Image: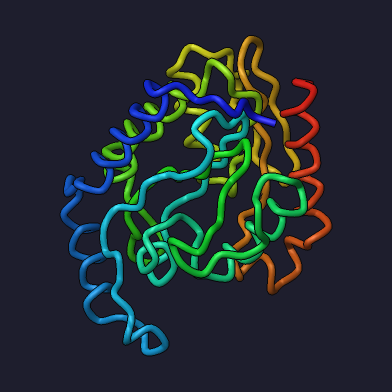
Amino acid sequence: MASASVSGAMVDSLREIREETIRCRACPRLVEWRERVAREKRAAYRNEDYWGRPVPGFGDPAGRLLIVGLAPAAHGANRTGRMFTGDRSGDWLFGALHRAGFANQPESSYRRDGLKLVDAFLTAAVRCAPPENRPRPEERDRCRPFLEREIDHFLPHLRCIVALGGYAWDHTLRVLRQRSLPVPSPKPRFGHGAEVALDGGPRLLASFHPSQQNTFTGRLTRESFDEVWSRAREIVESGV
């Protein structure tokens, strides 16, 4: 379990990253898309106020587990304002985190529904919903400093990073290498359950993303998803 005492400096650091994330307008294409989706809405959510801004990371400021996704979903986090909240991917993720003891409840529909992550922090490579869920390389690179700063914040006590999908896996490896952590060469290949031990740093685990494309087709099952979080729990508690 993470320490119950979190220094003011740690909290302020994440708060600063959060505020800068929400204000960001660095990528014109993403700004136009996220705001257009928020205006036009999906019929099922026509009476809701969409967030329509960059979505910051959230969770335990002293967490020893960092979870990295790709980007907010147009009618999920771009609507609710919290990563993985309000869509089917989030249903899978929070259910698995709850079963592994990293979340206090198994589902999350909106930003203030009482969900708390325990010893874990959830973030993404890109903070704005991209068209067709495909950010461009230059958009990814503009967004990269937010993840870099989050990783710097957690590194002193970080034991495990779980990358959800190949995009998050590749991006996280790039950031870790820039942090002078001993990332193996050639670059470790992505695959569900893949694991990389970084000497003097956290372990990196890979999971298929809990997207509908993966869960509906059976590429990702609840059992195989739970195996990743059981392994993450083992690493967080034992360090190996």
Relative to residue 107, is residue 34 drawn left or right?
Answer: left
- Residue in the foreground of this view, choosing between 163 and 191: 163
The image shows residue 169, relative to residue 150, as above or below, that is: below
x 26%, y 73%: residue: 38
Q: Position of residue 180 (x, y in %)?
A: 48, 12
Q: Is residue 16 above or below residue 127?
A: above
Q: Quadrant of the N terminus?
A: top right
The residue nearer to you, when weighing 232 against 219, is 232
* Left-right relation of 45 to 120: left
* Quadrant in which the C terminus is drawn: top right
Q: Position of residue 185 (x, y in %)?
A: 60, 19
Give the residue displayed 61% in from the left and 16% down from the top. Answer: 201
Against 105, residue 26 (above or below) is: above
- Give the residue drawn at x 58%, y 32%: 63
Scheme of colours in the image: rainbow
Looking at the image, is 224 positioned above or below residue 34?
above
Percent x, y of residue 238: 80, 22
Q: Quadrant of residue 163?
A: top right
Total numbered labels: 0
Q: Residue at x 34, y 60 (%)?
A: 130
User: Which of the two residues, 179 or 88, is positioned nearer the viewer here?
Assistant: 88
Q: Residue furthest front?
A: 5
- In this view, the residue farthest toward the bottom is 43
* Quadrant in the picture for residue 190: top right
Q: Nearer the viewer, residue 81 or 74?
A: 81
Q: Is residue 57 left or right of residue 157?
A: left
